[in-house]
Amino acid sequence: MQRTLTKQQKEERALPGATREQIREVMTAVGQPAYRAEQVAQWVYRHGASDYAQMTNLPLALRQLLAEQLPLRRLQTVRAQRSSDGTVKYLFALPDGERVEAVFLPYEDRTSVCISTQVGCAAGCRFCATAQMGFTRNLTAGEIVDEVLSIQQMENQRISHVVYMGMGEPLWNLQQVVKSILLLNKEVGISQRHITVSTVGVVPAIYELAQHRLQITLAISLHAPDDELRARIMPVGRKWKVHELVAAAKHYTEVTGRKVTFEYLLLRGVNDEPQHAHALAKLVTGLICNVNLIPFNQVETPDGFTRPEPERVARFRRILEEAGIAVTQRVEKGHDISAACGQLKLETARARA
Ligand code: SAH
């Protein structure tokens, strides 16, 4: 490997993050047989190796060479906060010192992690803690995968499900997100059907994602049944209209054969009235979808949003169900450890200030 690599190529050639093919290319370049690539991939993606020194079935000289050609850098755990219900919220430091959060969510029948795709976020949703930090940078596929690998190791449990619902907008980092999904699937061994990507509703990127024909679940943060209300709580609503979003969702189901999820965050007195439920039912009728209701997780916001009481949530739910819509409600966890999107990082930053 005499030629100089660009920064991007170097990032693509870091571990975790490199694909099996990319690892093979490096092996070929340094005159090694292909099976060495399988060994390295196993060490990193199956055993969570953090140093070439651990790869004792590789010759020492090769390990030293690989450390230069294919650098292995893992996330550092800054903080882990354990909830009484088993939820654990992790704050990770990336190699450049930036920080992101990820959450471990154990259930009876599965183990799930909620991961971040960007440092901060540019969407500016009025109810979201991450929005208050602004946008810093995209995560690489390797950093995204490492959130899962690190939690798997710290919890000493295999992760079965991954939700892209942490900090950031996955579809504004589409290339790295798709790469991370393929790595989680092929190398870490997580079924595509057990992976959910949640988007603020970046319409052109939904069409682009559909072209990849993945078997993942697409979740769309709708949160309002009309453009005016949606734009008030989500600035992206000014750019992409509700009917465009519904058309993109329809396209996604047609191309992939997968049901989509519409997420609907409930803010008391803002979007949780019966009229909103009726309008929502009308909007999604005929689509292959389900609606996931999310009562607002109380964070401090400039608008002073509050969480609706259970009766209001139940009323909203009933209207949808009576209209024949499939409704689920988010199983909420980790209230005692501020497990809502962006909360831990915000609190840690405030405590440091
Ligand atoms: N950017 C993506 C994924 C990250 S947010 C998206 O917008 O979908 C994941 C989900 O959490 C989104 O539905 C988001 O609207 C929701 N969310 C953000 N802040 C929340 C809060 N305080 N309480 C409940 N849900 C929240």
Image: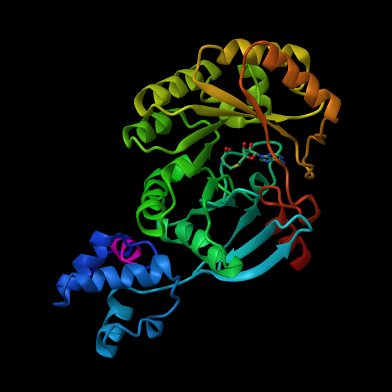
Most foreground residue, 192 or 133: 192
51 versus 19 height, above or below:
below
Residue at (48% x, 36% y) in the render: 217
192 versus 38 height, above or below:
above
The image shows residue 198 at horizontal and vertical percentages of: 54, 38
**How did the renderer colour the structure?**
rainbow
The image shows residue 315 at horizontal and vertical percentages of: 80, 19
148 versus 277 height, above or below:
below
Number of callouts? 0
Q: Quadrant of residue 206?
A: top left
The image shows residue 164 at horizontal and vertical percentages of: 53, 46
Magenta residues, start to end: 9-14
Q: Is residue 323 visible?
A: yes
Q: Is residue 2 visible?
A: no
Residue at (23% x, 60% y) in the render: 21
Ligand 1 lies in which image quarter?
top right
Q: Main secondary structure of the magenta part?
A: helix
- For residue 74, side relative to residue 329 (left or right): left
Residue at (64% x, 18% y) in the render: 225
State which quarter of the image contains the C terminus.
bottom right
The image shows residue 124 at horizontal and vertical percentages of: 62, 39
Most foreground residue, 211 or 57: 57
